[in-house]
Each structure stands twice: as C-alpha cells, then as structure tokens.
Amino acid sequence: MNTSNPSRLRVTGSLFVAGLVLLLTGCTNVNTYERAQSQATPNYVADKRVITDNTLAGTFRVVSINQATVSGNLLKIQATVENLKSSLRTLNYKFEWVDAEGMAVDSPNETWKAIQLQGRETQTISTVAITPRAVDFRLKFRE
C-alpha cells in the first residue's frame, strides 16, 4: 500500500472499518438444530390470549406454554416465544402468580424483564413460583 497519499489511506482505512462492521453485525442470525423426534414430553398448558396491542402481537407470539412441578410442590412455567420480525427485537415480559381463590400472589419474580431475540428466533422464558399457594399464572408482554 502506498502511504504517500493520505486521502487514499483514509479511504482504505474507512473501507476496512466498514467491512469489519458488516462482518461483525452480519453474524447475528441464529440457526437451530434439534432432534427430529423429540424425547421430551412437555405438559402443555392451553392458554387464553387477551390482545390489546395488535402491533405487539404482530411482533412476538407465544408458541407454547408448558408447566412442571419442581421441589415437590412449586409450579414452574415455561413459555416459548418467537420474534415474528426479521430484525433484532427486545421483548419485555413478566409472569404474575395467582392462588386457588384467584387472588394475586406477591412474588419478587414479578418484575419486568427484557430479552433480545434475533429475527425469527424462538427462545424460552420461565419462572418458578415461590410458594405452593400459586396454582396459576399470567404472562404479560409490553413494548
């Protein structure tokens, strides 16, 4: 490279930096591979959806929700969510717990959390109840 021409050196350096940025940002897609015939037997939960924000519903969707019992008597909920867009998006979500009488169960886990999903990526989110009084849940999304 001829270093006697400063403007040419700046252009070459700029092209190098631009190429490096493209290379680093171009590696954000996620490819997923799994068994063709899953060995897992999830306990799927039939869900009811209350949509108040159609834009949000067009960006993220719940693919499935399943539940398990851990530590003998605590309910664990896991939801698989999908980014329906082709670009990186941030999803804000929280789980809320409900007891057998339909009353809210206070939990330190009931805070808004954020996750980032690449375009078309699916990811699981989960929580565990802190008391066996929690028998049901609500999963909420917001922008």
Image: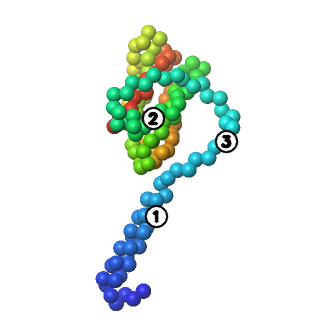
> Tag 3, which secondary structure?
loop
Residue bearing mark 1 = 23
- Residue 25 location, quadrant: bottom left
Decide: is 47 above or below 89. Answer: above
Identify which residue is drawn at 44% across, 48% down.
86
Q: Three-letter amino acid code at disc 3?
A: Arg
The x and y percentages for residue 105 are: 41, 18
| Label 2, residues with CA under 10 Å away: few <14, some 14-19, many ≥20 | some
Quarter holding the C terminus? top left
Q: Three-letter amino acid code at disc 2?
A: Arg
Q: Real-space Cα distance between discs 1 and 2?
A: 30 Å
Q: Return the disc, 3 or 2, that comes first in the chain's sequence.
A: 3
Identify which residue is drawn at 49% across, 29% down.
127
Q: Return the disc, 3 or 1, that comes first in the chain's sequence.
A: 1
The x and y percentages for residue 5 are: 33, 88
Identify which residue is drawn at 39% across, 20% down.
106
Q: Are marks 3 and 1 in contact (CB under 8 Å)?
A: no
> Tag 2, which secondary structure?
strand
Residue 35 is marked as: 3
Q: Looking at the image, which is closer to me, 143 or 68?
A: 143
Identify which residue is drawn at 40% across, 45% down.
89
Residue bearing mark 2 = 61
Q: Three-letter amino acid code at disc 1?
A: Leu
Q: Are marks 1 and 2 in contact (CB under 8 Å)?
A: no
Q: Return the disc, 1 or 2, that comes first in the chain's sequence.
A: 1
- From this viewpoint, is residue 23 visible? yes
Residue 62 is marked as: none
